[in-house]
Image (spheres, helix red, strand yellow):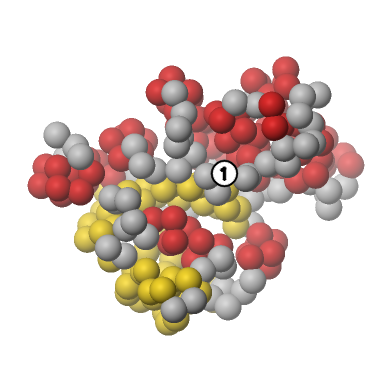
Amino acid sequence: MLRTEQLNAGYGKLHILYDIVFEAPKREITVVVGPNGSGKSTLLKALFGLATIYSGKIVFENQDITRLPPHQRAKLGIAYVPQTDNVFTTLTVEENLRMAGYLLPPEELKERIDLVLDIFPTLTQYLKRKAGTLSGGERQILAIAMCLIRNAKILLLDEPTAQLAPKIATYVLNKIVELRDRLGMTIVLVEQNAKKALEIGDRAYLLVSGRVVFSGKAQELLEHRELGKLYLGLV
């Protein structure tokens, strides 16, 4: 669904990603792991058009989107959820959901809101609360729900469990699995908690110093003692 060909990217003159060959197949969770500073978040930003592309290509559903700005990529169905600043904190939960679907016809918007509240029932009790008063986990759920309102085809999630309590982090990851299994969504998951991410993932990429040092099945990387111990802290 989404792939790169020999992608070189960074910010301005700061070169971070080198010759990245990457693919996120349809209806799968593709996990991107690696040590701090390895380029994981930059890869997501490059896919969404927020980083400088020096060379290479980004292809989405057989369309070259390498030079498309972020808002055009969003229209195609690509949704990017950053780690922070991903909701409108001064608006209520309900207003956030409505804002996400402001271009939809009223009847379709209602259907989309009903769907996300069915998937994330915890949001129902917070509809009238300001998003800024939610916990970190609740904000992540709201941010993902807003992408579903827009009927995104692929989710680019940047460390959605960062700084969350273990129980809440597990809940968020379980919901990501539900999005794949129930809605058939395609998900690219950048995650610091490598073990839990690889346990739910289908495919995996290990980035080290801006280069891919492993690509294959998530289970294979989870069981790869040398790489796991060296780069991911897995024992």
User: Residue tagged by mark 1?
Assistant: 84
Label 1 CA crowd tier, 10 Å (few <14, some 14–19, many 20+) = some
Q: Secondary structure at mark 1?
A: loop
Q: Nearer the viewer, residue 171 or 158?
A: 158
- For the residue pair 230 and 157, the one nearer the viewer reads as 230
Check the image and name the residue furthest to the bottom. Answer: 55
Q: Position of residue 21 (x, y in %)?
A: 34, 69
Residue 232 visible, this orientation: yes
Q: Residue at x 46, y 29 (%)?
A: 164
Q: Residue furthest front?
A: 13
Q: Position of residue 17 (x, y in %)?
A: 36, 69
Which residue is at 79% across, 36% downward? 91
- Which residue is outermost to the right? 106
Callout 1 amino acid: Thr
- Residue 112 seen in render: no
Q: Is residue 107 left or right of residue 85?
A: right
Left/right of residue 68 with respect to residue 108 in the rendered view: left
